Image (tube, helix red, strand yellow):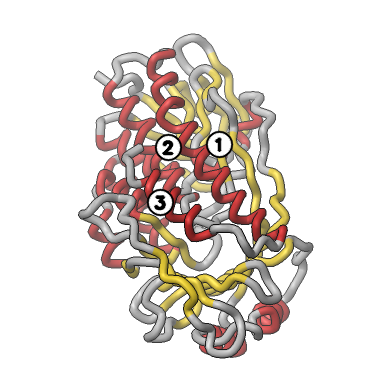
Amino acid sequence: MTAVSRVAIAGCGVAALATAIQLAKAGVHVDVFEAKPELSALGSGITLQGNALRVFDALGAWEEIRDAGFAFTGLNLRAPGPGAPIVAELPDVKSGGPNYPSTMGMSRPDLARILFDHAVTAGANVAFGASVTGLEQSDDHVTVLVNGAPVGDYDLLIGADGLNSVVRGLIGIETVPEPFGMGIWRSFVSRPAEVERSELYYGGPVYIAGYTPTGENTMYAFLVEKAQDRTGLSDEDAARIMVEESRAYDGPWNSIRADLEAGAPANYTWFTKHIVDAPWNRGRVVVIGDAAHTCPPTIAQGAAQALEDALVLTELLVSHATLDDALWNEFHARRLPRAMAVVEASAQLGQWQIDGDRDADAGGLIFGIAMKMAEPA
């Protein structure tokens, strides 16, 4: 017997789809409501640490994700300037355990498609163009309103609807993402043969320049700068800015600039930071993933933490007989400290860059968090 038999999920990102997969596999009726008109994934590529890969295996999606991405070990730190010399090779931590690579890069749309297909195959119902706009709670159910009209009664509503979560506001949580002071340019480009793992350049005209391989012939490149208004730019202007801001970086950046000049698209977003203090639920409604916590992606743990939220929550919903305080207390005890550690470490790395602290031990902090993540959630 599960704690829930009917669940509504707002959102269609990694946390939402992972939750839908696990609950549907357990025989729970799952309705997913996504405000966008179709499945989409902003950005170009994504870096997935081993603890995220461990979750994919639990979902039954690991083999497809492994085949669609680019697995690698280690992280190189390079210096700006001629030759882009490697100044440090960080030790490998398999945070998912010995059965998975330490890290993988892949296309965000590919990841979204694989998880979506698994959710539908498991039996979840997914509606697009469906915005959760309201809810009404009682002791034994929550009535969900979509596009202004009630769509049914559920045992639980899960708000996995991202950093601008509507569900978070509907249940009165006032903690919201705040701009962190950094913005990031991203582009999907070809992979030079010499790029076999993520590489980061600290120093130069931007805070961080880097890239991550996502396939045999692809990778995504990024530049982290001081946050500024980049709205209204043409595709040509966006690519030109990435070209100009990256001229101080040699090595594989020469190939990246060539792709940008040939028309590779570039997109821009701001970094945010927030974490909702316990409880993440209000009665029969709970927020997870980016709705509950965001941070600068300086240690590439955002997706992994969202996936862990989903895995722990569904494990408890399936193993407990009732949706009670004991379940929520266990959920928060397992998730809040871990998510908090990632948010704080990620923000510290970012702040060191903003402050220009060249003596900070970025490598040590990254390694330390990786060791923490090696312990299952």
Quarter of the image with the C terminus is top left
Q: Which residue is mark 1?
A: 292
Question: Which secondary structure, mark 3?
Answer: helix
Amino acid type, residue under disc 1 in the picture:
Ala
Q: Depth check: 206 or 313 in front?
A: 206
Amino acid type, residue under disc 3 in the picture:
Ala
Residue 37 shows in the view: yes
Judge the density around disc 3: few (<14), some (14-19), many (≥20) Cα neighbours within 10 Å: many
Position of 242 relative to 59 (above/below): below
Quarter of the image with the N terminus is top left
Res 309 label: 2
Q: Please report whichever mark, 3 or 2, sits nearer to the chain's N-terminal start.
A: 2
Q: Depth check: 13 or 74 in front?
A: 74
The residue at the point 72 percent across, 79 percent down is 237
Res 370 label: 3
Which quadrant holds residue 35?
top right
Q: Please report whichever mark, 1 or 2, sits nearer to the chain's N-terminal start.
A: 1
Question: Which secondary structure, mark 1?
Answer: loop
* Direction from residue 311 to residue 333 in the image, left or right: right
Q: Are marks 1 and 2 in contact (CB under 8 Å)?
A: yes
